[in-house]
Image: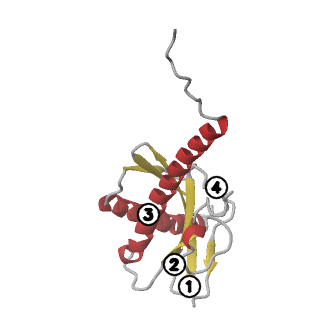
Amino acid sequence: MSTKKNKKQPSRFSMISEAANVYGARSFDNYAQIRSFAERLQAGLCAYMQHDKKCVFLVPPQGPFQSQNYGSRAFSVSGKGFLPLEPISFGMGIRVSDSGDFMRIVLHCRIEGARIFMQVEEKKGYDFSLPVQDDDIDVCKEVLFQHLLHWFTDRVERYDHGNYGSTDIGFDIQRVDEN
């Protein structure tokens, strides 16, 4: 005679619930690491560019923006209810003139294992080990500085040599009323 006890199998709902809880923990970790990276980058970029005023803000990756930090609304997963486990984009509104012009740069980030991958606009990607070190943040600051400088100098060069028409779809420079 068998003495095995009947083990009650978990319900299908409890299996889905457990999987959803694991998913939620991972999606929060993904968001927290990318947001921390964004905030660290934003915090030191003005000093890196040797500007004495607050000149960099975390802004939504698309749509109108003001010269202010948007908190969680600066990230592409904002307002989606259940936090999705996916790559996250955010905007950095960077002051580019003394007259209050800001340019938005959109960064796309994803985490794979113990690495974070960052892509500026649709350009070259960069990756760093987690946790991101201060030296890696400095590399990112230089990448953003070079991206902005090249954006302007390249277009002036094209204009000066008669080839300034392009198929670029909408640049994102805005004059922002400072409060």
Query: Considering the numbered disc 2 on the image, is that residue within a helix, a strand or a loop?
Result: strand
Q: Badges 1 and 2: C-beta atoms under 8 Å apart?
A: yes
The quadrant in which the C terminus is found is bottom right
State the image coordinates of residue 163 (x, y, percent, origin top left): 63, 61
Amino acid tagged 4: Phe
> How many labels were placed on the picture?
4
Instruction: Tell me the CA gap for discs 1 and 2.
Output: 7 Å
**Of tags 4 and 2, which is closer to the observer?**
4
Which residue is labeled 1 in the image? 100
Residue ID for mark 3:
36
Disc number for residue 89: none
- Residue at 55%, 46% (x, y): give it: 23
Label drawn at residue 82: 4
Q: Residues within 10 Å of mark 4 (few under 14, many from 20)?
A: few
Q: Which residue is mark 2?
A: 95
Three-letter amino acid code at disc 3? Ser
Disc 4 versus disc 3: distance between alpha carbons? 20 Å
Estimate the spatial distance between the alpha carbons at disc 2 and disc 3, rounded to whole Å.
21 Å
Q: SS class of the residue under badge 4? A: loop
- Under mark 1, the amino acid is Gly
Q: Nearer the viewer, mark 2 or mark 3?
A: 3
Distance from label 4 to label 1 (Cα)?
37 Å
Alpha carbon distance from label 4 to label 2: 33 Å
Q: CA distance from mark 3 to mark 1?
A: 27 Å
Sequence-first disc among 2 and 3: 3
Instruction: Give the label, 3 or 1, closer to the camera.
Output: 3
Instruction: Name the mark nearer the viewer: 4 or 3.
Output: 4
Circle 1 residues within 10 Å: few <14, some 14–19, many ≥20: some
- Select label 4 or label 1 by which is in front: 4
**Residue at 51 percent of width and 57 percent of height:** 31
Comes first in the chain, label 3 or label 1: 3
